[in-house]
Every structure is written in structure tokens, then in C-alpha cells.
Image (cartoon, rainbow, N blue to C red):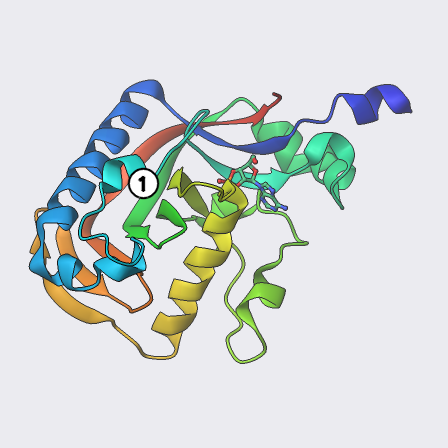
Amino acid sequence: GSMEEVSLPLYFGWFLEYTFQDKLEVMAKDFLKTLGTLEAFKKHIRDFSGEGEEETNLEQYFQHKGPLHCTTKYCNYGKAKGAKEYAEKESVRQQYGSMTKLVIGALFITPRTMGVRVLLTQDQLQLWPDDTEEKADAGPEAELPPGSRAHITLGCAEGIKPVQTGPDLLEILQLQKQGQEGEKVQDLENGPLAYYGNGIWVLSFTEPLLAPALFSSYYK
Ligand code: ACK
């Protein structure tokens, strides 16, 4: 019936608990501040700035609105493929409104997006939709396991939509799968920083962060 279709959200996902949200935002800002001062970054500033521009304020470069979350299923109020089926899944109904801990393995930026990679547990994978774009995005050579795309968008460049963070993460994972480790730049407070070319910077956390989060949905 139409009632049910109307009640589908923009998306389902895990929403970071408030105090952790603040903590992650502070950490991301500190990271950008540090990155902006590194000679290695300045050498590649062209990835983030126009011709003739010698500086970029990374903290202003990435903007974010709305709650920090890890999207499981984008539903677009029922217009997205598989939205209704997802909402009716047994695991979704059962776990709706419950808390979990997301494991955050890395922080990355590209000229388009900033985000963190979420490493899903087997339990959390039950909430991952079956019809993801992972295969299509990853290309024929590099099939990535389900849930590879899981991330939290921390910011986007002007004119870029948050839907870009997933493909950006998949691009990094493909590079890693092809054996590229990036050019190790230096150890930062939380772990090693590597440059993968094309404006892709990855900070791998030596100790993964544990983020308390609520499985719920979002309506604008
Ligand atoms: O950062 P995100 O995961 O990317 O969170 C936002 C959220 O839904 C609201 O826009 C994500 N999103 C938008 N469009 C899509 C899509 N087609 N597939 C998967 N996720 C999407 C976006």
C-alpha cells in the first residue's frame, strides 16, 4: 500500500553516538591541520588547489551537514531499488533501534571526499544490503567482499555529494588489493600516513577506533 511506501526513509544506517561524533570531528580537524603543514602534502597541493594557488585550507575545503553515520541502505523514500525489501528484512526489523560498536580502521581524503573506513563484523554484515554496487564499482579484476564500501562521510568538496565517498573508498581498496601500499609519508599520532597518488591520502589507525552507534533511519 502507499502508506508503507511513504514511510520508507531516505536511508538506513548506523548513527554515531553524540560524544563520539564530536571526538571524530575533532580528530579529523586535527588530521587536516597536520596534513596541511607537511612538506609531502605541499608537494602535491595541486591535487587540491587551482593553478597558481599555493595554499589550501583543508578544514574549509571539506564541508559536512547532517548526522555522522554509516549508511547501510539508501532508500530515497522508497524510490531506490530494493528499498522496500530491505526495510522488511528480518535482521533490519530485529536490530532497528539497537546499539552496536563500529570498528573504524582508517581515515582517508581524496580531492572529492573525506571519510573513515568501517570494518563490519559478521553481525553487522547481516544489515548490509545484497544489492550493492560494490561489484560494478570495483571493476572486473578486483571483486571486493560485501561491506567493503562501509564508511562514514566526514566531508565533501564544494559541489560533491556524499554518495561519492563510497566509490572513493572502493578505489583505495582496489589499489591496495592490487598490491599498492602507497608511498609511506610518515607516522602520525594514530598511525602511518600514506599517499596513493591523485590526491588520495590514507591514515591507517594502528589501533582501530571503536565507535558506539545506533541502527536507525533518517528522514529529511
Ligand atoms: O555519506 P553517505 O553514505 O552517502 O550518506 C549519504 C546518505 O545516503 C544521504 O544522502 C548516501 N547515498 C546517497 N545516494 C546513495 C546511493 N545511490 N547509494 C548509496 N548511498 C547513497 C549518502
* Residue placed furthest toward the front: 52
Q: Position of residue 154 (x, y in %)?
A: 36, 38
- 23 relative position to 164: left or right: left
Q: Position of residue 110 (x, y in %)?
A: 35, 55
Task: Tell which of 106 and 121 is nearer to you.
Answer: 106
Mark 1, residue position: 61
Q: Position of residue 212 (x, y in %)?
A: 35, 29
Question: Which residue is rendered at x = 51% and y = 64% of the image?
Answer: 145
Question: Which residue is rendered at x = 33% and y = 43% of the image?
Answer: 103
65 shown above or below 144: above
Task: Tell which of 2 and 122 is nearer to you.
Answer: 2
Visible residue check, residue 10: yes
Visible residue check, residue 148: no
Task: Tell which of 77 and 35 is nearer to you.
Answer: 35
Question: Which residue is rendered at x = 66% and y = 29% of the image?
Answer: 93
Q: Quadrant of ligand 1?
A: top right
181 shown above or below 90: below
- 182 relative position to 82: left or right: left
19 shown above or below 207: above
- 159 relative position to 43: left or right: right
- Quarter assignment of residue 96: top right
- Quarter assignment of residue 21: top left
Task: Tell which of 51 and 28 is nearer to you.
Answer: 51
